[in-house]
Image (cartoon, grey):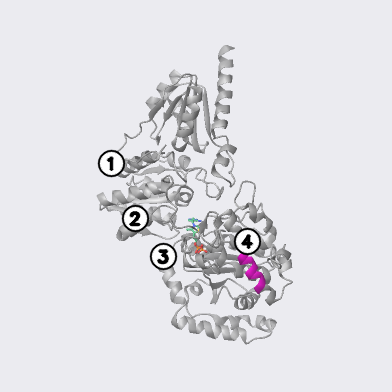
Amino acid sequence: MYDLLRTIDDPADLRKLDRRGLKQLAEELRAFVIESVSKTGGHLSSNLGTVELTIALHYVFNTPYDRIVWDVGHQTYPHKILTGRREGMSRLRMHGGISGFPQRSESQYDTFGTAHSSTSISAALGMAQAAKLKGEGRHAIAVIGDGAMSAGMAFEALNNAGVTDTNLLVILNDNEMSISPAVGALNRYLARLMSGPYMAARKAGERLLKGVPHMLELAKRVEEHAKGLVVPSTMFEEFGFTYIGPIDGHDLDSLIPTLRNIRTARGPQFLHVVTRKGQGYKLAEADPVLYHGVSKFEPQAGIPAGKGGGKLTYTQVFGDWLCDMAAKDQKLVGITPAMREGSGLVRFAELYPERYFDVGIAEQHAVTFAAGLACEGMKPVLAIYSTFLQRGYDQLVHDVQIQNLPVLFALDRAGLVGADGATHHGAFDLSYLRCLPNMVVMAPSDENECRQMLYTGYVHDGPAAVRYPRGSGPGVAIQAEMTALPIGRAEVKRDGRRVAILAFGSMVPVALEVGQELDATVVNMRFVKPLDEALIADVATRHDLVVTLEENALMGGAGAAVAESLAAAGIVVPLLLLGLPDRFVDHGDQNLLLASVGLDRAGLLSAIGARLDAVRRRAAA
Ligand SMILES: Cc1ncc(C[n+]2csc(CCOP(=O)(O)OP(=O)(O)O)c2C)c(N)n1
């Protein structure tokens, strides 16, 4: 088992193999990915799709001198395994272990940090321009999926690259899938490229390639030969690229000669590679969506059907609320930027297909599209991860907030998300949302409050956001009935002495535990904007110490809002702000990460205890 793979510690080892060796390597690599991911969890389907492409790229190009930029980076496990991180895979996505995405700090082969999609062409173009300016002959290669290709940013980069003479190679890894099936006109266009007359042209091109034994000879006349492969008037040609393909991305005998030829070509090249998500593992081939991102599983048996039974996740609470609300209000429309499963929209999409919009990986468009719907009296609900709304920020400010349009933002994965790490933590939304005029910002402390807040935001005549964490809450029962909460009103959960803990959202349950222990007052703040300023002022004058608690960056976050409110009211009180520190938090288990930043019970008790002692000492002095 893994006889050959075990000998590859660097792509230089790979380059010593002959073609037969490469085929065996592909088999071993695929088996290793399946075994490894079944033990750690992580992304599976996409990695099974890139086994041969990864081998071919490292075989043909002189990595790391030549730069490969992987888009999203969730498909880089084969790349990690072949670039010295085979052993590291046993601690994939764990605290202190290797990342599930490329990271410059992890390896010289990881040329660009990613995890949010559609950045690869821009980054690779930057590298290609730098090479040109510095007089270096290196190649820059962007590998981008058809899902990631749907984003505006990818097209901005194509638009720019097509008028340059840089040695940029864009490889489109087309598997007709995003996480769920790819959507949109681009997807249809790519499907057309693989049919009828286009395919005939491709066949002619392939024959041309195979008929030329001497690659150097071919290289010299690459222009003409490339022409043989060019499908007339593809969109990518119109953009200024030489379009090559489509070719079978699982066939090393197609990939290697084609890449070798491209290596000698000049100017922007576009290679269209067709792969299958989940390739080589029957269960993933049959259900690539289920096997896109997995927890540990038994490879023979696969992922057990309908796990269920546990506590409801916040994502499910949202999905159920959306369906209930849609049944009551015909004007409701649900929007997702390519995250139907992750955002809990599967049932809504089935029940209300005409009011369901998967707009592709296009967060900017999703926000402005929602604004347009709202202008015409529809009631848009945009389901989006906290981290991905970052990409739609100007649209949020310019298109929604300034026009005060009633769009409801359901922000999932707010706070620390765990194994996906710094690129995915929802660490900034309270800061970036609360500074915007017109915004109502809510953070639920339990599942039922989440449902009621979604309703509150929905019926509010202006923009509103509800931000909830990954996973499940404390497990309270959900009331079917929906009641709007009074906007800007907090809820005192417990009356205590000396210390008042003002807790936001996911921090309320642990605040209650700590409050019990310290006999402190505990407030569920509910609203980050508008704040319950009267309550804050009242609490501040009745306690020796005010503590704020949030799962968001301290800078500009909810605690900062409380401090601003106290300053505006001229109230001086000892204040302790607890939240995420001013550094990026790595990947790892969610609870472990919370503890690592002092936001678990023990960390809070010690921080509050120490500050209370200091306050007492100062009072006594
Ligand atoms: C900006 C952004 N939005 C959403 C996501 C979530 N996401 C991760 S992978 C993925 C699908 C990518 O599809 P594709 O590029 O075709 O790659 P494949 O998995 O099919 O190989 C999505 C939507 C993301 N990573 N970045």
Which amino acid type corresponds to the residue marked 3 in the rendered image? Val
The verdict on residue 482 being magenta is: no
- Tell me if mark 2 has few (under 14), some (14-19) or many (20+) residues whose alpha carbon lies within 10 angstroms of its own: many
Mark 2 and mark 4 lie on one chain; the one further toward the N terminus is 4
Mark 2 and mark 3 lie on one chain; the one further toward the N terminus is 3
Mark 2 and mark 1 lie on one chain; the one further toward the N terminus is 2
Which amino acid type corresponds to the residue marked 2 in the rendered image? Phe
Does the Cβ of the disc 4 residue fall within 8 Å of ligand 1? Answer: no
Q: Circle 4 sits on which residue?
A: 127
**Residue shown at 46% from the left, 38% from the top:** 506
- Rounded to the nearest whole Å, what is the CA distance between mark 1 and mark 4? 56 Å
Q: Secondary structure at mark 1?
A: loop
Which amino acid type corresponds to the residue marked 4 in the rendered image? Met
The magenta-colored residue range is 23-31
Mark 3 and mark 4 lie on one chain; the one further toward the N terminus is 4
Q: Nearer the viewer, mark 2 or mark 3?
A: 2
Q: Circle 3 sits on which residue?
A: 183
Do the numbered discs 3 and 1 sit on residues whose CB atoms are within 8 Å?
Answer: no
